[in-house]
Image (tube, grey):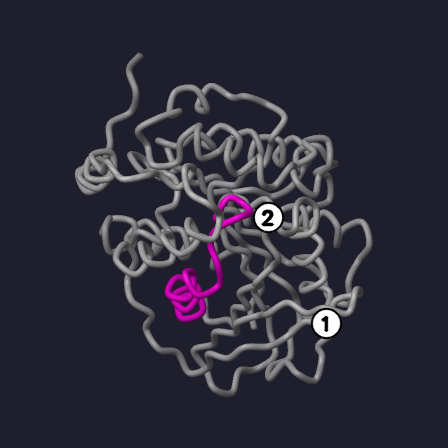
Amino acid sequence: MNLPPMRPDVAAYVAADNAISHPRLHEMPVEVARRVVRRLARTTDLPLEPVAVDRWLEVPLADGSTIGLRLFDDKANCAPGPMMLYFHGGGWALGDVDIYAPVCAEMARTLDLPVLSVEYRRAPEHPSPTGQRDCEAAARWVAGNPAALPVKATSLILAGDSCGGAYAISTAMALRDTPAALPVAAQLAFYPAADLATRYPSFREFATGYLLDRHLMRWFAEHFRPDDTDFRASPMAGNLVGLPPALVVTTELDPLRDQGRAYAAALELAGVQVVAHEAAGMTHGFLTMRAAIPSAQTELEAILATFKRLIPPR
């Protein structure tokens, strides 16, 4: 099998990771794996560059609990306009808002809009579909322009990576079916887990040796317990007609690559405006690896320049 080549900086990082002999994430208890991922992110990603606004908000949920939102804005007094909600990756069980703070701040600066990073509840404590419901609740709360928000939103931009990319898609679907107080103007899905019901060729081609592997994906699924017939866990189980314009990002050396490609193709068939961007020679998870893989930052800059053209003007 002739697989695509890796970029030199990707190859160096992947080789170092594959050479590690200590226990892998899928061999750890969830709480230990979460600590390891947080610690690793401090070395693999670029540091958080300060922005004018970096503050926490709380979203009240119907069951009486709350989830957190971390607001990033490069302007202290932002005019009304689109607001992005970002749903982080981490296989439904790992990842958190703090890990994604550097890239969310970067998006706020580059796209010139407020970014709200959503601390949805994770598996296994909260299996499917709790996380998607949290993401939807956060989007509806922001659309209502509550007094707690320091800036007025005029539309929503939904974005996320990996499982968070799937949450961005499924939340857009939920808000299409039962509209919120504001429209969803665009969606940005980085290497989304868009179709859990199908085993695509890339799942087999990149099953081991490319950071995200079959053992870790199985561990994620065991904790999350997704229903692959439910669009809230597997978006392509639902109807894609009428979704907002999308930029779908895939990575060439990724078990999830073909899910993202299939999602972009299905959007086009459904009559949705879609731009597909594939990062050649790149692996899954590059958003939080911009220090370890320098070309990941260049890739992100190109992606955001493309996405900016899909966002309505302020």
Question: Is residue 106 a member of the stretch shown in magenta?
Answer: yes
The image shows residue 267, relative to residue 95, as above or below, that is above
From the image, tell me which residue sits under label 1: 60
Residue 98 left/right relative to 147: left
How packed mark 2 is, by other alpha carbons closer than 10 Å (few <14, some 14-19, many 20 or more), is many
Residue ID at (69%, 46%): 243
Which is more N-terminal, label 2 or label 1?
A: 1
What is the spatial separation of the Cα atoms under label 1 and label 2, in whole angstroms?
Answer: 20 Å
Q: Quadrant of the C terminus?
A: bottom right
Q: Nearer the viewer, residue 294 or 278?
A: 294
Res. 123 mark: 2
Label tally:
2
**What range of the chain is rendered magenta?**
90-110
Residue 178 occupies which quadrant of the picture?
bottom right
The image shows residue 287, relative to residue 157, as above or below, that is above
Q: Nearer the viewer, residue 227 or 164?
A: 227
Percent of width and height locating residue 8: 17, 38
SS class, disc 2: loop
As drawn, the residue found furthest toward the top would be 1
The image shows residue 33, relative to residue 6, as above or below, that is below
Residue 176 left/right relative to 293: right
Percent of width and height locating residue 80: 61, 79
The image shows residue 274, relative to residue 312, as above or below, that is above
Q: Quadrant of the N terminus?
A: top left
SS class, disc 1: strand
- In the rendered structure, which amino acid carries the disc numbered 2? Ala
Residue 46 occupies which quadrant of the picture?
bottom left
Question: Is residue 12 a member of the stretch shown in magenta?
Answer: no
- In the rendered structure, which amino acid carries the disc numbered 1? Pro
Res. 126 mark: none
Q: Nearer the viewer, residue 228 or 85?
A: 228
Residue ID at (45%, 69%): 108
